[in-house]
Amino acid sequence: MRTIPGMVVMCPSDDIEAKAAVRAAAKYVGPVYMRFSRFASPVFHSEDYKFEIGKGEVLQDGTDVAIIATGLMVNEAIEAGKALEAKGIHARIINMCTIKPLDEELVLKAAQECGKIITCEEHSVIGGLGSAVSECVSGGAPCPVLRVGVEDRFGEVGKMDYLQKELHLTAANIVQKAKEAVALKR
């Protein structure tokens, strides 16, 4: 969907963001693709949340690694951030609802200040958020980008807890990738 000219691609992280994104999509002149999880994720936005197409949101500040997540993976990133903090790793957690247009300014700032990025999505690692972030930093602030998402394989149907574990879409997998990223030289 990212390859279609003028297309907006969004993947909300909770119910409040989903409502705000739908309202923004209704006002947008042009094509919009929205991907929703079929499973409920914890709500962490307040009712006064202001959503804007093309803008990401820093949920937690940190300088050791930036974790940029979308959709239901935002909650997993928040949980991973807590686990990493307990290990002395200070992760910047960014909610990136809009995958296209990508908030390049926020991504480049994270790349420059953290030097390492993990992307997290319940989507293929090919063509989604990880690809968009990699394309952005390659030209503006090169740094390692590790991706947590569905590897190059066909999808499956099943219960969410099974699928998250089977597809490695968990906070534990984000923590592991963050440890790998922090160990990399800048």
Image (tube, helix red, strand yellow):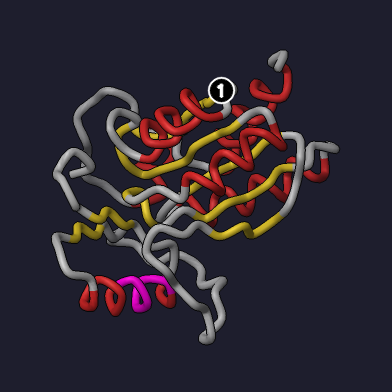
Magenta residues: mostly which secondary structure? Answer: helix
Vertical order, 29 against 93 (above or below): below
In the displayed orientation, state which residue is furthest to the top: 185
Taking the spot 32% from the left edge, 49% from the top edge, the residue there is: 100
Quadrant of res 35: bottom left
In magenta stretch: residue 152: no
In magenta stretch: residue 20: yes
Q: Which of 171 and 32 is in front in this view?
A: 32
Q: Quick one: label 1, few (<14), some, or many (20+) residues within 10 Å?
A: some
Q: Give the range drawn in magenta.
A: 17-21
Residue 47: x, y in percent?
Answer: 51, 86
Quadrant of res 3: top left
Total marks in image? 1
Judge left or right: residue 109 versus residue 33: right
Taking the spot 53% from the left edge, 26% from the top edge, the residue there is: 145
Task: Name the quarter where the C terminus is drawn.
Answer: top right
Taking the spot 34% from the left edge, 78% from the top edge, the residue there is: 19
Give the amino acid type for the residue marked by disc 1 in the picture: Pro
> In the structure shown, which secondary structural element does the residue marked by tag 1 occupy?
loop
Vertical order, 37 against 49 (above or below): above
Judge left or right: residue 70 versus residue 180: left
Taking the spot 44% from the left edge, 35% from the top edge, the residue there is: 133
Vertical order, 145 against 11 (above or below): above
Residue 85: x, y in percent?
Answer: 79, 45
In the displayed orientation, state which residue is furthest to the bottom: 47
Residue 168: x, y in percent?
Answer: 45, 33
In the displayed orientation, state which residue is furthest to the front: 140
Judge left or right: residue 90 versus residue 145: right
Residue 152: x, y in percent?
Answer: 27, 23
The residue indicated by pointer 1 is 142
